[in-house]
Image (cartoon, helix red, strand yellow):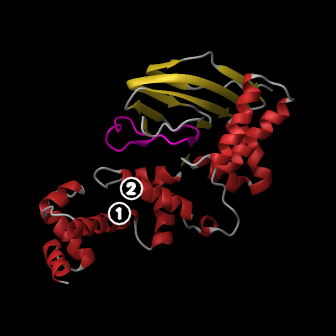
Amino acid sequence: MTYRHSMTCYTEGIRATAPVKWRGLDGLMGVYWDAEGQSGAKAYYLSPDPRIVIFFNDVSPHIRMSNRDGELGRHDRPMTRAIYVPAGVPLWTSFMSSHRFSHLDIHLHKDRLLRYLAPSVGTSFALAALRRPVEIQDIRAIEALASLLVNEVSNPTKHAVYAESLVGCIVAGLLEIPEQGNEQTNGRLTQAQMNRLISRFNECSDCRLTVAEMATTVGLSESWFANVFKQTTGKTPLQWQLGRRVELAQKLLAESELTVADIAAQLGFSDQAHLTKAFRQIAGETPAAWRRMRQAG
């Protein structure tokens, strides 16, 4: 049965530069766009079903994205070449400069996607994968599959099962599907999840994330994330984050001439005393004493 997707969408300053091409399939909808966004253009998207967006050019210098309202310009991040947005996850985007782009949207009914994955990986693993957002910049293999799918969306020449199979390959190549025996099955975060969390932390201007933001980054509920994070690192999320901030403070103390007060402000501490207390707790010395020891050694 042909699937008709449902999505709340608001755009400003973005226009299609060619007729939109689309094709409805069994539980899937492929939509290909050539478009242009002006500097300052913005958009909001929310769907009850998951979707995949694949860009055919690098948009990271031009488009920023966030999953929280009002955080564009604060805790946003560059748009990557391919993203998987789980069902019910909102997305805000903003253009930093004018840019022409082309992209493929793949809308997937959540039940159809679950039916595709569950026979191979099991229902619990499939559900875990569907809840976990994915953002990747290197899409060489996926881009080739997406190009073939665009051809079938734009000018169908084969049975629908061919296009549906291409979607299945893209899903399998993009989603982080747990395997039996990996860290996630033992109640631990995967290395890919930790890498994504570290990347998200490094992108924060003030190096602070709430536990809810950290959980969203790796596609887990807040309570489950807090549990598996401690199993993985031996620390609570906030203890780990504080340690990362102190590591950055050490780097700035060693490599810059910034004052301790300036470093505290840059890393989101309330004041110099707050940084000094945290620094002594983790490094065993005050920031000033640690800097003197480094310079003397």
Residue drawn at point x = 73 percent, y = 33 percent: 149
- The kind of secondary structure element at disc 2 is helix
Q: Position of residue 159 (x, y in %)?
A: 87, 29
Q: Is residue 211 shown to the viewer in this render?
A: no
Q: Quadrant of the C terminus?
A: bottom left
Q: Looking at the rendering, which quadrant does residue 274 occupy? A: bottom left
Disc 1 residue type? Answer: Gln
**Residue 60 falls left or right of residue 120:** left
- Residue 167 visible at all: yes
Q: Nearer the viewer, residue 281 or 260?
A: 260
Q: Indicate the quadrant where residue 197 lies.
A: bottom left
Q: What residue range appears in magenta?
A: 67-89
Q: Is 74 inside the magenta-drawn segment?
A: yes
Residue 192: percent from the left, percent from the top?
55, 60
Of callouts 1 and 2, which one flags the residue occurring earlier in the amino acid sequence? 2
User: In the picture, which quadrant includes the N terminus?
Assistant: top right
Would you say 234 lies left or right of 163 here?
Answer: left
Name the spot of residue 94 as percent of width and height, x first: 40, 31
Decide if residue 225 is on the left or right side of residue 250: right
Mark 1 is surrounded, within 10 Å at the Cα level, by few (under 14), some (14 to 19) or many (20 or more) other residues, namely many
On screen, residue 236 above or below 172? below
Residue at 65 percent across and 68 percent down: it is 182
- Amino acid type at circle 2 is Phe
Q: Which numbered marker is on residue 201?
A: 2
**Residue contact between numbered discs 1 and 2, judged by CB atoms under 8 Å:** yes
- Residue found farthest to the bottom: 297
Residue linked to disc 1: 241
Number of numbered discs: 2
Tell me the mark number nearer the camera, choosing from 1 and 2.
2
